[in-house]
Image (cartoon, rainbow, N blue to C red):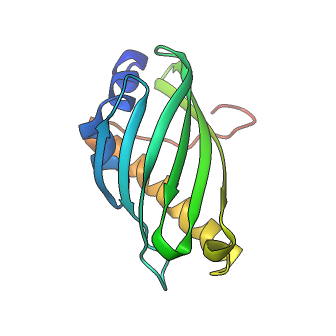
């Protein structure tokens, strides 16, 4: 079981995040609330490298933050998104909620919306698996209705 303070610390540790983010080639703080990121994405038929930044807003330490990302993937153009990540104490450790949305340039979307959506979901799923491994913790998917 990982307590909320430990999970929060890991969510702000570039070494843990770089290990957890699939395709992460570099991740460094450039300011107190901004990270520079280089990420290689597996889209099946293409493997673009995106350079960009992640910025944190609405930070409530050990409770939540909103992570905004924007990256440029060469000729495939821009991708951007945001995720609200919140933590709650739970009888089995820490409950992490994530609500995310994203958009991409028309060049990137020309690869197909379902391909992009599928790739994004794989990155998210793999992130949580690798984040748990990095923390030596277990991840359980809970029913959103019951929290069980």
For residue 131, what is the image quadrant?
Answer: top left
**Residue 48 percent coordinates (x, y):** 43, 73
15 left or right, relative to 35: left
Residue placed farthest to the right in the image? 145
Q: Residue at x 54, y 68 (%)?
A: 119
The picture quadrant where one finds residue 142 is top right
Q: Quadrant of the C terminus?
A: top right
Work out which quarter of the rendered image holds the N terminus and state it: top left
Compared to 111, does 62 lie above or below?
above
- Position of 112 with respect to 132 (left or right) is right
Residue drawn at x 67%, y 40% is 143
Give the left or right position of residue 115, taking residue 87 as reference.
right
- In the rendered view, tell whether residue 109 sits above or below residue 53: below
- Would residue 71 be seen by someone viewing this image from the given angle? yes
In front: 7, or 39? 39
The image shows residue 114 at horizontal and vertical percentages of 68, 74
Position above or below: 126 against 87 = below
Q: Is residue 31 above or below residue 61?
A: below
Is residue 87 among the parts visible in the rendering?
no
* Residue occupying image coordinates x 49% and y 41%: 140
* Image x and y of residue 44, in percent: 48, 81
Residue under the point 54% across and 74% down = 76
């Amino acid at each position: 079981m990982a307590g909320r303070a430990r999970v929060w610390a890991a969510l702000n540790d570039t070494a843990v995040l770089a290990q957890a983010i699939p395709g992460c080639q570099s991740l460094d703080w450039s300011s107190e609330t901004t990270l520079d990121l280089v990420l290689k994405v597996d889209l099946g038929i293409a493997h673009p490298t995106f350079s960009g930044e992640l910025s944190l807003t609405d930070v409530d330490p050990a409770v939540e933050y909103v992570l905004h990302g924007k990256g440029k993937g060469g000729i495939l153009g821009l991708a951007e998104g945001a995720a609200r990540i919140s933590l709650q104490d739970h009888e089995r450790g820490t409950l992490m909620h994530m609500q995310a949305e994203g958009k991409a340039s028309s060049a990137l979307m020309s690869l197909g919306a379902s391909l992009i959506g599928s790739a994004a979901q794989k990155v998210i799923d793999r992130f949580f698996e690798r984040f748990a491994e990095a923390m030596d913790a277990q991840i359980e998917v809970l029913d959103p209705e019951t929290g069980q």
